[in-house]
Image (tube, helix red, strand yellow):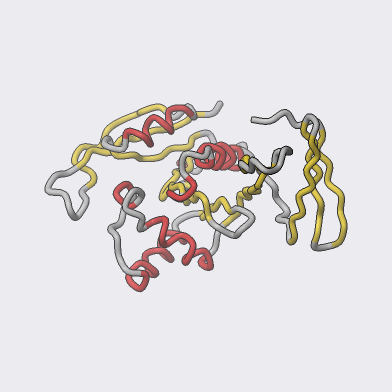
Amino acid sequence: MFNIIKNNWIQKSDQEKILSVFFPNYQYIIVKRHLPLLITDILFIRVQNKRIRKKKFLFFISMLRIGTDKDFDGLYPIYMHPTVNPYLSFEIMSKEKFLPLFNELIQSGTLYVYENTDGEITATCIVCRLKRRCASTVCLTTLATNPIFQRQGIGSKFLRELINEIRKDEEIKRIELYAEVDNEIALNFYKKFGFQEEGRLKKYFKRAQDNHFVDELILAIIFN
């Protein structure tokens, strides 16, 4: 989006670092306390201010990390959002009812979250490694982007970095996922990353409020 000329890190103390970002004709100093160890992305958003001639930018640093049960409160509103929940494997329910199900989900695989500098979870996925003769395959489940941060490219960045993280294990040859046939936005999104349809599970999925079943599609990426 912007032409970055120089990007330097200067350590000021154990808990503070200064990121100097230089753009043509402007220099911006961004201070971040308790900087995460893994920096995966920096997004700059223009702030309109007619009274100030120089451009100003707000920033968000997104970090891919392994989640824990302590992320429950941050994930719950994402899972239960009316635009997200219809494409997950469970119905909308109270926190009390969902907690044991959440614990079951995170025990089934490795929970990943994408977190910004304010500690907000912007995207999430549970990566399940298959076993024995299928150990070269992982399945992406409960994949969701926080609706507050949709249409900002965060979902794409999250999935790209998640795939790169998974591929660090050279024994992984296949990443698969399942998507409902009526989730056209997600299907187009996955295909942009190289996922290809491999099959259809008929009458596989039924939401409590619907009087009909929905077919589920199997998609996968294969690595040499």
Question: Can residue 169 be spotted in the picture?
Answer: no
Quadrant containing the N terminus is: top right
- In the image, 219 versus 212, the foreground residue is 212
Please report the residue visible at 53 percent of the width from the left and 34 percent of the height from the top.
Answer: 173
Residue reaching furthest bottom? Answer: 96
Q: Quadrant of residue 215?
A: top left
Please report the residue visible at 64 percent of the width from the left and 43 percent of the height from the top.
Answer: 49
The location of residue 180, given as percent across then percent down, is 29, 39
Q: Is residue 194 above or below residue 65?
A: above
Q: Quadrant of residue 165?
A: top right
- In the image, 7 versus 138, the foreground residue is 7
Please report the residue visible at 41 percent of the width from the left and 63 percent of the height from the top.
Answer: 102
The location of residue 141, given as percent across then percent down, is 42, 48
For residue 173, side relative to residue 104 (left or right): right
The location of residue 77, given as percent across then percent down, is 41, 60
- In the image, 57 versus 20, the foreground residue is 57
For residue 15, side relative to residue 173 (left or right): right
